[in-house]
Amino acid sequence: MSLSIRNQFPGTVAAVTPGAAMAVVTVHLDGGGRLTAAITREAVGELGLTEGAAVRALVKSTEVALATGPVDGLSIRNRLPGTVTAVATGGAMGSVKVDTGSGALTAAITVDAITELGLASGTPVVALIKSTEVSLATP
């Protein structure tokens, strides 16, 4: 199956914390780093997610925010530090590619944000992704 989702990170389930309807799944990424996904308990069962299971974490580029400085006081669990490798801009939106050390990541953000943050190749950033925006797939 091919997907239009640009951000795909292979990894291994490190922990599954079930709740009443949702579960939090911690994934250790193959390239290092960690992502947390908040998915339904039903999905955990259907995918057979247990500690040690191989997964692919999927994140749409429109669900990635970027910061250029320290990030404190946020509920966002996923914070991947990295370096901008490329910036492409269009009319209103742009695409920013980031090397996170855990894999390449693409963020679709406004051209205004790219300009205000001074994003260019070599800029250090932190990619921010809410746990509810991380989907998981199994091989």
Image (cartoon, rainbow, N blue to C red):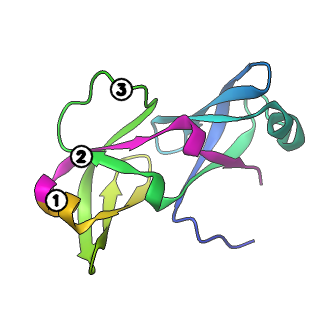
Q: Is residue 92 above or below residue 35?
A: below
Quarter of the picture holding the N terminus: bottom right
Q: Position of residue 55 (x, y in %)?
A: 69, 45
Q: Which residues are magenta?
A: 116-139
Q: Are marks 1 and 2 in contact (CB under 8 Å)?
A: yes
Q: In the rendered image, which residue does mark 3 sit on?
A: 74
SS class, disc 3: loop
Give the alpha-carbon distance from disc 3 to disc 2, as whole Å: 16 Å
Please tell me the numbered disc located at residue 119.
Answer: 1
- In this rendering, position of residue 99 left or right of residue 5: left
Name the amino acid type tagged 3: Leu
Could you tell me residue 81's position as x and y percent? Answer: 31, 40
Is residue 22 placed above or below 123 in the rendered structure?
Answer: above
Residue type, numbered disc 2: Val
Q: Residue at x 44, y 53 (%)?
A: 103
Residue 66's spot in the image, x, y percent? Answer: 29, 48
Residue at position x 31%, y 21% from top? Answer: 73
Number of other residues with Cα within 10 Å of mark 1, as a class: few under 14, some 14 to 19, many 20 or more: many
Can you name the residue that lies furthest to the bottom here? 91
Where is residue 122 drawn, in percent x and y? 15, 57
Q: Quadrant of residue 89?
A: bottom left
Q: Is residue 30 visible?
A: yes
Nearer-the-camera pick, 46 or 114: 114
Number of numbered discs visible in the structure rendering:
3
Circle on res. 125: 2
Which is in the foreground here, disc 1 or disc 3? 3
**Placement of the C terminus among the 4 image quadrants:** bottom right
At label 2, counting other C-alpha atoms closer than 10 Å, the crowd grade (few under 14, some 14-19, many 20 or more) is many
